[in-house]
Image (cartoon, helix red, strand yellow):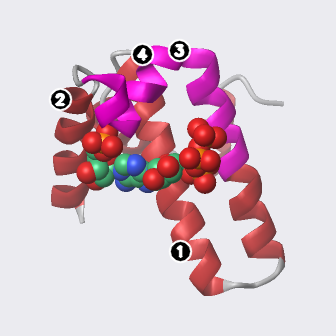
Amino acid sequence: MNDILESLERTIRERRKAEPDTSYVASLRAKGRAKMAEKLGEEAVEAVIAAVQDDKAAMTGEAADLLFHLMVLLADMDLSLEDVTGELARREGLSGLEEKAARGAS
Ligand SMILES: N=c1c2ncn([C@@H]3O[C@H](COP(=O)(O)OP(=O)(O)OP(=O)(O)O)[C@@H](O)[C@H]3O)c2ncn1[C@@H]1O[C@H](COP(=O)(O)O)[C@@H](O)[C@H]1O
């Protein structure tokens, strides 16, 4: 599973340098971060709808779109999956309440 995400992360970094008319990733880069964020929001809403409708097939596709667009945005911010998994690993070492407190949540 991680192999696929790591491979996709490399592909996204590489395709950012392509000509926008030959690559969806490059076209998003050309449109800018606000457009990437907008796409992430759209995909999140579509995933929410699939979940509420209990549509597993749609949810699988929407979750893939959501992950992909999140990774495009992370790459634009020069963040990696390792940054995210590192944060998840840190949280795993804490209980739920400790983790909430560490994030400053009420
Ligand atoms: N995983 C994906 C992936 N998932 C979704 N999408 C695209 O995301 C877009 C979003 O869906 P929408 O229905 O909102 O599409 P749209 O109406 O064309 O989008 P907008 O005009 O609103 O921006 C679609 O065009 C999908 O093709 C993806 N495009 C690319 N990848 C991966 O990225 C790699 C590099 O792609 P290129 O940059 O195109 O070479 C590919 O090999 C794939 O592995």
Query: What is the crowding at mark 2: few (fewer than 14 residues within 10 Å), some, or many (at least 20)?
Result: few
Residue toward you, 74 or 65: 65
Task: Name the mark nearer the viewer: 1 or 3.
Answer: 3
Can you say which quadrant of the picture contains the N terminus?
Answer: bottom left
Identify residue for label 3: 32
Q: CA distance from mark 4 to mark 2?
A: 15 Å
The magenta region covers 19-43
Position in image of residue 9 (x %, y %)? 25, 40
Residue 29 lies in the magenta stretch = yes
Identify residue for label 4: 77
Task: Name the mark nearer the viewer: 4 or 2.
Answer: 2
User: What residue is at 22 percent from the left and 20 percent from the top?
Assistant: 17
SS for tag 4? loop
Position in image of residue 103 (x %, y %)? 64, 26
Amino acid, disc 4: Met
Identify residue for label 2: 14
